[in-house]
Image (cartoon, helix red, strand yellow):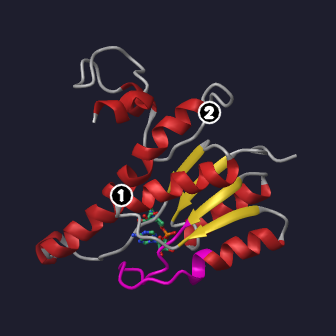
């Protein structure tokens, strides 16, 4: 029996590099996966569904469960789709691992604004894209798995800073967030 047997995880950037290692490890340890990867060049240009499909097939061939998604995680619609896919395929969501990232290797003095914006879009908005729609299902799974993991948010991410705009009560459930829109 694996250490995360029966859990459901989304892994962004899950087809190559660090993300691929996490995908294989999670599958080996019993998790059912939604693997997102744009399959582009290291600088984020282009896109190819092949890498995501390839690792999902590899995991399925080894007896695991994985669904592939080749979307751009910098688009909020992609994160929403990943959460929907997890819930539709597996009935719940327990873990989100945000690994998707790009490299625009520059020093600050020769960093064009366009490169800055693209890195921020993939790395920061890419986290928002998954974490916001995932917050309600993740909170639902906290009862079953109190140690449910999420890469981007620390424990402070769940409770918010003292007297934040959401109110000073700790641990307000984001399940209520959609109603507050
Ligand atoms: N490799 C390192 O030493 C290192 C160290 C610290 C942090 N990191 C960070 O860890 C992350 C992964 O690093 P890596 O070395 O495995 O990189 P990698 O380039 O091997 O893998 C990143 C994956 O993310 C995917 N991706 C890129 N943009 C995407 C998007 N918009 N939507 C969905 N998928 C997208 C790529 O297609 C790629 O498969 C990066 O964010 C990187 O900045 C890496």
As for residue 156 lying within the magenta part, the answer is no
As for residue 50 lying within the magenta part, the answer is yes
- Left or right position of 137 against 118: right
Crowding at label 1, few (<14), some or many (≥20) Cα neighbours within 10 Å? Answer: some
- Residue 81, percent from left and from top: 48, 58
Q: Main secondary structure of the magenta part?
A: loop
Q: Nearer the viewer, residue 30 or 43?
A: 30
- Residue 48, percent from left and from top: 50, 84
* Quarter of the figure that contains the C terminus: top left
Q: Quadrant of residue 91?
A: top right
Q: Residue at x 53, y 31 (%)?
A: 139
Q: Is mark 1 within 8 Å of ligand 1?
A: no
Q: Nearer the viewer, residue 72 or 20?
A: 72
Against 7, residue 163 (above or below) is: above
Q: Nearer the viewer, residue 155 or 84?
A: 84
Q: Tell me where the magenta segment starts and ends, as one range.
A: 36-52
Against 89, residue 52 (above or below) is: below
Return the residue at label 2: 141
Please tell me how many numbered marks the rendered image carries.
2
The secondary element bearing badge 1 is classed as helix
- Residue 6, percent from left and from top: 77, 44
- Residue 95, percent from left and from top: 59, 45
Residue 76: numbered disc? 1
The secondary element bearing badge 2 is classed as helix
Residue furthest right as drawn = 1
């Amino acid at each position: 029996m694996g250490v995360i047997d029966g859990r459901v995880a989304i892994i962004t950037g899950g087809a190559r590099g660090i993300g691929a290692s996490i995908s294989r490890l999670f599958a080996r340890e019993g998790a059912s996966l939604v693997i997102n990867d744009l399959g582009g060049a290291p600088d984020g240009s282009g896109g190819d569904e092949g890498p995501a499909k390839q690792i999902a097939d590899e995991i399925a061939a080894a007896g695991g469960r994985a669904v592939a998604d080749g979307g751009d995680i910098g688009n909020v619609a992609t994160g929403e789709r990943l959460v929907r896919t997890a819930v539709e395929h597996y009935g719940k969501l327990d873990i989100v691992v945000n690994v998707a990232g790009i490299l625009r290797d520059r020093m600050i003095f020769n960093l064009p604004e366009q490169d800055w914006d693209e890195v921020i879009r993939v790395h920061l908005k890419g986290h928002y894209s998954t974490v916001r729609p995932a917050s309600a299902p993740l909170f639902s799974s906290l009862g079953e798995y109190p140690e449910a993991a999420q890469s981007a948010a620390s424990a402070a991410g769940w409770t918010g800073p003292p007297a934040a705009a959401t109110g000073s009560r700790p641990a307000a459930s984001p399940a209520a967030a959609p109603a507050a829109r």
